[in-house]
Image (spheres, helix red, strand yellow):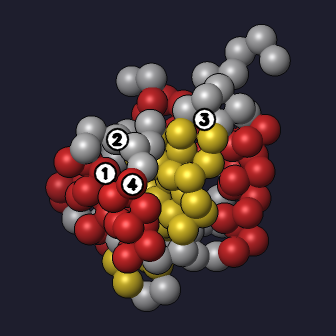
């Protein structure tokens, strides 16, 4: 446990696929992170942000058929580093989010953790 860059970091997980959300949460906790959520919807994520201040976030871009752009805007507005997970190609992501790392589904959880660590420590 020498190098755990996510130790005590509060990470918001916004993902509507239950099994994937659960796996992400487990992996993050194994890395020492405090997981907020997982939250499966835009409204749920925005409500959680009203009372929580995450250090970083993993955000699925499509939550039950609804684009998660409002959540991304809220996170960016608060200065919270985030990464996207999505099954869509880069063309589905608005230009204003072009600077945010995108991990394509099916996801590799180790790749997501590495991308999140880079975003947090950039």
Closer mark to the observer between disc 4 and disc 3:
4
Lower position in the chain sequence, tag 1 or tag 3: 1
Which residue is under mark 3? Answer: 114
In the displayed structure, does residue 68 sit left or right of residue 64? left
The reply to whether callout 4 and callout 3 are in contact (CB within 8 Å) is no
In the displayed structure, does residue 117 sit left or right of residue 107? left
- The secondary element bearing badge 4 is classed as helix
Judge by depth and name the residue closer to the eye, 54 or 23.
54
Lower position in the chain sequence, tag 2 or tag 1: 1
Q: Quadrant of the C terminus?
A: top left
> Residue 62, image x and y in percent?
44, 76
- The secondary element bearing badge 1 is classed as helix
- The secondary element bearing badge 3 is classed as helix
The reply to whether callout 2 and callout 1 are in contact (CB within 8 Å) is yes
The residue shown at (75%, 71%) is 19
Which residue is under mark 2? Answer: 80
Lower position in the chain sequence, tag 4 or tag 1: 4
Which residue is under mark 4? Answer: 51
Label 1 and label 3: CA atoms lie apart by 19 Å
Q: Quadrant of the N terminus?
A: top right
Judge by depth and name the residue closer to the eye, 75 or 117.
75
Judge by depth and name the residue closer to the eye, 68 or 106.
68
Q: Which mark is residue 75?
A: 1
**Which class describes the residues within 10 Å of circle 1: few (<14), some (14-19), or many (20+)?**
many
Vertical placement of 35 versus 118: above or below?
below
The residue shown at (77%, 51%) is 26
Vertical placement of 39 versus 26: above or below?
below
Lower position in the chain sequence, tag 2 or tag 3: 2
- The secondary element bearing badge 2 is classed as loop
> Residue 109, image x and y in percent?
70, 50
């Amino acid at each position: 446990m020498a190098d755990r860059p996510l130790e005590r970091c509060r990470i918001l997980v916004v993902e509507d696929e239950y099994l994937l959300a659960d796996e992400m949460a487990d992996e993050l906790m194994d890395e020492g992170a405090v997981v907020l959520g997982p939250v499966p919807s835009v409204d749920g994520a925005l409500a959680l942000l009203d009372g929580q201040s995450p250090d970083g976030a993993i955000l699925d871009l499509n939550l039950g058929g609804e684009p998660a752009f409002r959540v991304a805007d809220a996170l960016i507005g608060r200065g919270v580093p985030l990464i996207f997970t999505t099954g869509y190609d880069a063309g589905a992501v608005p230009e204003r989010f072009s600077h945010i790392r995108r991990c394509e589904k099916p996801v590799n959880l180790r790749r997501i953790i590495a991308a999140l660590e880079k975003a947090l420590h950039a």
